[in-house]
Image: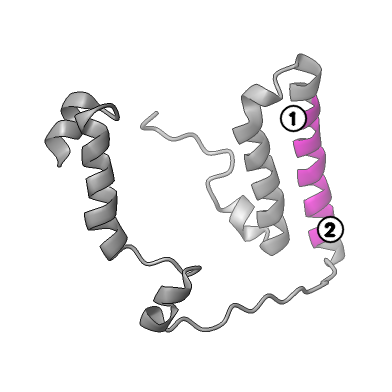
Amino acid sequence: VSNPIMKFGFLGAGRVAMEKLRSEVLDRILLRRTKLERQADVKLPTLEIKIRKDSLSPQERDFYTSMYTQGRTQFDTYVEGGTLLHNYAHVFDLIMRLRQAVDHPYLIVHGTFGKVDPKV
């Protein structure tokens, strides 16, 4: 199966091999939570969504506000430079940092935020 895919890519014999891989191999081993026919096999508990409205302490609010201000400044820089669409991954990262700041400031202070990877 892999030889035609490697040789032809997703065209011709490679496409046929991909379809065969999907139908004969992957469909048999992959289970999806949303498929009703697999629900009895997996026995997952029902999905519960709880919405909580918590308030931040003054220190947490101050920390979040400073993170928001830094993120907003960076976002505005992208908008003013006309590079917002080129930096959507960075914008997503800014939003995720705000989420982490709400979850717990420790995730930002002691996480990978602002650290440089020596491998890069």
The correct choice, above or below, for 113 with respect to 51 in the image is above
Mark 2 crowd level (few <14, some 14–19, many ≥20, 10 Å Cα): some
User: Is residue 36 on the magenta stretch?
Assistant: no
- Nearer the observer, 10 or 114: 10
Query: Residue at image x 21%, y 25%?
Result: 8
Residue nearest the observer in this picture, 86 or 72 = 86
Residue at 36%, 81% (x, y): give it: 41
Of the pair 18 and 52, the residue shown nearer to us: 18
On the picture, is 64 further left or further right than 105?
Answer: right
Image vertical order of residue 73 relative to residue 65, above or below = above
Looking at the image, which is closer to me, 13 or 53? 13
Residue 61, which numbered label? 2
Q: Amino acid at mark 1?
A: Gln
Relative placement, left or right, of 111 versus 42 is right
* For the residues bearing labels 1 and 2, Cβ distance under 8 angstroms: no
The residue at the point 72 percent across, 50 percent down is 98
Q: Which corner quadrant of the image does residue 87 belong to?
A: top right
70 in the magenta segment: yes
Query: Residue shown at 65%/48% (left/top)?
Result: 96
Question: How far across and down, in percent of the image, does residue 54 sit?
Answer: 82, 72
* Magenta segment: 60-76
Q: Pinpoint residue 118: horizontal percent, then vertical percent.
A: 39, 32
Q: According to the image, label 1 marks what residue?
A: 74
Quarter of the figure that contains the N terminus: top left
Give the tally of numbered discs.
2
